[in-house]
Amino acid sequence: MKIKPVVLEKINTRHTNYLIDFEFETNITFIIGDSGTGKSAVFSFINEFSYEEKRLRCFNYIDYNKNYKQSIRNSKNKIFVIDNADILLDDGMRRYISKDVMNQYIIIGRNPRGLALSYDEIYEIESSESNDIICFRLKKALI
């Protein structure tokens, strides 16, 4: 189910020599990719940006035993960035996220099952370098 972003249409932030320049078309953006393509680095940079942008909430494998599910269910107008989604998101949370029209999600994982996504909602990270700045952008995944 495609829903326009409900919180932010883009994230643009810089960390030292790295620039994150993401534009969102739907409220769920699923990011896949091989190891070493920048997924965890991007999560780290967005997590750092979340200290400035209070609408962002970031979760990864470290939060497995914390009450992140309740945080998601009790929130409105937030962007949840979830790394290691294959570990964190059980079938119930995937169903919940797929129907949530009050929040926006950036999900990093290998398996988008249970999120009711179409192929054009699945992305990879593309990086380019210019003037010693590495820029990360989203591109449609070739699956």
Image: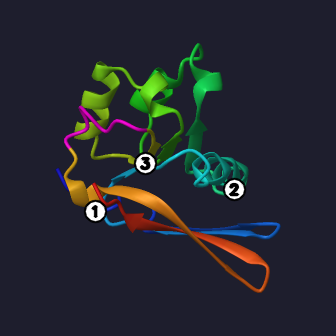
Q: Secondary structure at mark 1?
A: loop
Residue of label 1 = 4
Q: Is residue 107 above or below residue 130?
A: above
Give the side of residue 74 with respect to residue 39, left or right: left
Residue 115 point in image, percent of width and height: 25, 38
Which amino acid, mark 3?
Ile
Residue 72 point in image, percent of width and height: 44, 31
Which amino acid, mark 2?
Phe
Give the side of residue 63 with respect to residue 84, left or right: right
Q: Earlier in the sequence, mark 2 or mark 1?
A: 1
Q: Secondary structure at mark 2?
A: helix
Identify the residue at image location x=73%, y=51%.
48
Q: Earlier in the sequence, mark 3 or mark 1?
A: 1
In whole angstroms, how far apart are the C-alphas of marks 3 and 1?
21 Å
> Quarter-wise, where is residue 49 in the image?
bottom right
Residue of label 3 = 32
> Which mark identifies residue 49?
2
Q: Is residue 135 above or below residue 78?
A: below
